[in-house]
Image (spheres, rainbow, N blue to C red):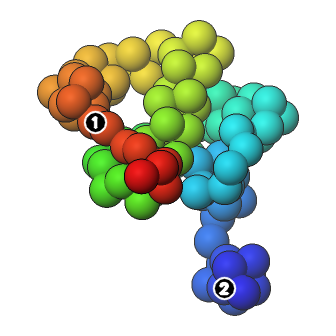
Amino acid sequence: KREVNKKVLKVPEIEVKILEATRNEPWGPHGTIMGDIAQGLRNYNDYQMIMTVLCKRLNDSSGRNWRHVYKALTVSEFSVANGADRVIDELQEHTYQIQSLCDFQYMSGIR
């Protein structure tokens, strides 16, 4: 259903990739997709879209969606190393958001 919606709504390819890289699945983002995202960060329009999704995912601190946060941090780290230099500046502007994750806790179904 999700894939059909993306095609019907004509979601841009780079947005599909960043959403896929940070989705709530139990596996990490694939290296190929992260490479495409890093390349997209060199394009102004793609950059805006990628950073918007990353910041939204970093704010998704509800325990249920903890993978969004984890994967957004993973993609952010990869982007700092492999993307455009302005990624560093943007992430520095969101330092408060990232620092707030220091207190983030999630316990998987263990009672």
Q: Is residue 107 above or below residue 81?
A: below
Q: How crowded is mark 2: few (under 14 residues within 10 Å), some or many (20 or more)?
A: few
Residue 20 image point, x, y percent: 67, 55
Horizontal side of 79 relative to 39 (left or right) equals left
Identity of the residue furthest to the right in this view: 32
Indicate the secondary structure of the residue bearing disc 1. Answer: loop
Horizontal side of 11 relative to 92 (left or right) equals right
Q: What residue type is labelled 2?
A: Asn
Identity of the residue furthest to the front in this view: 111
Q: CB of mark 2 within 8 Å of CB of mark 1?
A: no
User: Looking at the image, can residue 76 be seen?
Assistant: yes
Q: Residue at x 43, y 23 (%)?
A: 87
Residue 5 is tagged as 2
Q: Residues within 10 Å of mark 1 (few under 14, many from 20)?
A: few
**Where, by quadrant of the figure, is residue 32 drawn?**
top right
**Where, by quadrant of the figure, is residue 36 drawn?**
top right
Question: Tag count in the figure?
Answer: 2
Q: In this view, does 5 lie above or below 108?
A: below
Q: Which residue is drawn at 58% across and 57% down?
A: 24
Q: Which residue is drawn at 32% across and 17% down?
A: 89
Q: How far apart are marks 2 and 1 (CA)?
A: 32 Å
Residue 73 image point, x, y percent: 47, 30
| Mark 2 or 1, closer to the camera | 1
- Where is the N terminus found, in terms of image quarters? bottom right
User: Looking at the image, can residue 93 be seen?
Assistant: no
Q: Which amino acid does label 1 sit on?
A: Phe
Q: Which residue is drawn at 68% across and 79% down?
A: 2
Indicate the secondary structure of the residue bearing disc 2. Answer: helix
Which residue was labeled with disc 1? 104
**Mark 2 or 1, nearer chain start:** 2
Q: In this view, does 22 lie above or below 33?
A: below
